[in-house]
Image (spheres, rainbow, N blue to C red):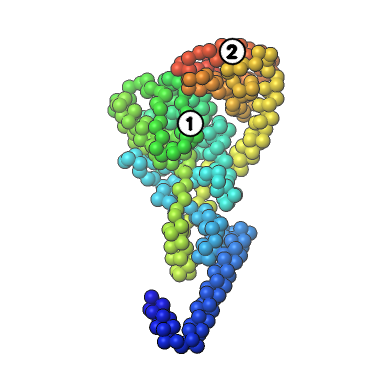
Amino acid sequence: MALMTAILATWNSGDFNVILLIAGLLVSALILLSRLFFWRKEAGKAFCAAAKFAPSGDILARYARKGVLAGNKEARLLYIFSSPASFSGRRPLTVFKVKKVPCVFSGFYFPARYRKHLSVAQENFTRCVLAFKDGLNDGIGFFQEGIDCLKPHEGTIIMFMPCSAWWKYWIRFRHIADYIDRRCPQLANGFDYYTYLGERDSLHLQKNRTDAVIERNFEIRCDLTGKDVIVVDDVITSGKSLRLLKKQIEAAGGHVSGAIFFAGTFAMPGRAVTFLTAFSEEITGGNMPLCSACDMTVSHRQDITGTSSLYDSFVTDRNDCANNAGKRYRTERGHKNGTTGNMPDRTIIYEDSSMAFCYRHFIPGKRPYYTAVHIPAEKKEAEHIMRHLAEIVEADKHREPTEYELSLNDHPYYD
């Protein structure tokens, strides 16, 4: 403001030489600032490139930090993922509370849009979480780590977070339930404590998940009066599902004394927080107590690399398997109002090479529902089931989608 006043005063006085001098200074300042911004941008690109090809996590964090200070957006993501626990109020294998319930998880789960910025360990761990959801990872390792952290007393009941469908619940938690029966005599197995009333939409497929209303599709069918319960689930994000299940358990007389999760969804920090953290670390000489480069627990009692490879194979082969299977049991009827194109909506492949084909059914004016058919590993049995599959789908497409749908144990060819 003072500069503009001086320019106007000089202009009114008619001293054009001074005006030209001031104008020259302004142009020079603008050129200098533009060059500074240009080289700052180029420096950010250089630091980001150096971080990508860094030979170690510490060097990656150092160059990514400098890229953050230079304003590079990609370097900001690299810097955050070099030490995610430094930007989160929840740390792996460290007990925190959700509505006074002690909780613990083994590592961070990162949404798919950030995968290209992850380290190998972070990517493998994320794949393990997805494999657990699909039944390709037994999850016993993270369960053991959670038990070691929470240290439950004898007689504590282990219950599992209800899923959107009965078959998802079965493939996801059956290994841990079996492990409890075989190896944990001090704990009670609550795997069969639910009665499913139907199926609901998966929460992770809904928009605005934090505001979504979770439809209850189960009932607790036992008396939990005076019992302590530990809940086991795959991923914790906001803790909404845990709070709702806690109310149901308390209504049955139980007390939720803890919760064990495979992973915690990482919440991205704001730009200001990231910049201030980088700036603070820079002025202290990089000696701030940041966590390790990957912040990922790799001490699981399962083989993370093997599980990652298994999941890669599963993702690669699933579509081919579904396509080939679809051709084999395609019939002449067409099922116009049933499944889409006779193709399964989801194909689950188990370790014993058996499969389960899950079909999504649509009826105008009604909620869609699923049916599933288990295909045993034996080829002879599989052929019987595939011949019978068309009749099952044809019969199911006329049913009201309010009943408990096909159960693996109820299937006529289930072994």
Quadrant that contains the N terminus: bottom left
Which element carries disc 2, helix, strand or loop?
helix
Q: Residue at x 62, y 61 (%)?
A: 49
Nearest to the observer: residue 174 or residue 265: 265
> Residue 180's spot in the image, x, y percent?
46, 29
Disc 2 marks which residue? 394
> Residue 347's spot in the image, x, y percent?
61, 27
Could you tell whether 262 is left or right of 338 in the image?
Answer: left
Q: Amino acid at mark 2?
A: Glu
Quadrant that contains the C terminus: top right
Which element carries disc 1, helix, strand or loop?
loop
Residue 354 in the image: above or below residue 134: above
Precedes in sequence: disc 2 or disc 1? 1
Residue 394 in the image: above or below residue 299: above
Residue 244 in the image: above or below residue 284: above
Tag shown at residue 87: none
Disc 1 marks which residue? 202
Q: Amino acid at mark 1?
A: Ser
Q: Residue at x 59, y 26 (%)?
A: 345
